[in-house]
Image: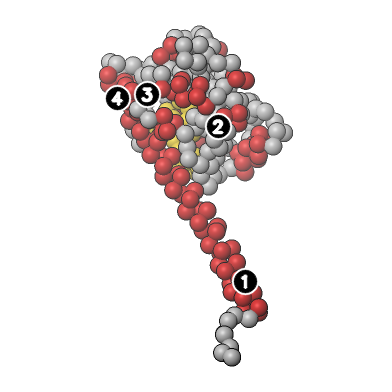
Amino acid sequence: MVLKKGFTLIELLVVIAIIALLLSILMPALSLVKRQAQGVVCQSNVRQFVMSWTLYAEANEGAIVGGTTSNEPWNNESWHYGWVKPPQEEDGVPVADADVTLENEIRGIERGYLFPYTDNSGLYHCPGAREVVTDGGYRSYSITGFMNGEGAGINYNPEHAVSKINQIVRTANKVVFFENRDPRTWNKGSWIFPPITPAGSTNCPGWGDPFFVWHSKSNSLGFADGHTEMHKWVDDSTFELMEMLENGTINTWWGRQPSDREDIEFIFAAYLPRI
């Protein structure tokens, strides 16, 4: 008889152990590469939004698109021509928050005033974000409140708001598009801080709308001069608030004053377009 050679059980176990070791080494690296790739796509999305936002203003004598994405009539008129419309039925009737579906959201996106300049609903979702509609919605980006958004309403010190692109001071430092997730069923309204009090004050009163981070402690931001950046958050308190919101310990960031303030001071300065 001719004896056939093969692996012994010990040899097979050694090979399996080596493969498992290699996978344990490679998986974190592959995960990091995936997150980096998602960040590149996300920043590209924001860049296209800023370009479209600028084109809209050029086509409308400098008027910037409405930043409010709500199904409620706010104290200004920007919600009538919002960059994104609220989730809605085929006949245009807004859908109640509890009943929002992905189809409703996409329909609102495609009927928004900025969509003719983007022409791709896929741009409105970050590839690193959750895709569950009931956990923050499909759209991953908001316009900041004073960029002709919800912050222009009478309850939010409208003297800080702008409706024309030439009203923005230091455009390279002013954020228009903010990557975020809303803990409600869809990304509703603008991204805002609490009302600035007293009227005319520029002291930061504390956090307002929350956000979540999908890119290794960074978010995509789009600025009024057209540039974008992947901004890295640094304060421990910022991530503690995210974790508390994620696990249901809190349901809002409003008015919370962090002990470490680099993050909140950065975004507050970038939030006020007239200063």
Mark 2 and mark 3: span between their CA atoms?
20 Å
Disc number for residue 17: 1
Looking at the rendered structure, the secondary structure element under dot 2 is loop
Q: Is residue 27 visible?
A: yes
Q: Do the residues labelled 3 and 1 touch (CB within 8 Å)?
A: no
Mark 4 and mark 1: span between their CA atoms?
57 Å
Say above or below: 191 vs 1. Answer: above
Disc number for residue 181: 2
**Which of pointers 3 and 4 lies earlier in the amino acid sequence?**
4
The image quadrant of residue 56 is top left
Residue occupying image coordinates x 35% and y 28%: 118
- Which residue matches tag 4? 55
Instruction: Rate crowding at label 1 as few (under 14), some (14 to 19) or many (20 or more) other CA atoms within 10 Å.
Output: few
- Which residue matches tag 3? 115
**Which of pointers 3 and 1 lies earlier in the amino acid sequence?**
1
Q: Quadrant of the C terminus?
A: top left
Instruction: Rate crowding at label 2 as few (under 14), some (14 to 19) or many (20 or more) other CA atoms within 10 Å.
Output: many
Q: Where is residue 203 in the image (x, y as percent from the top left)?
A: 55, 25
**Which of pointers 4 and 1 lies earlier in the amino acid sequence?**
1
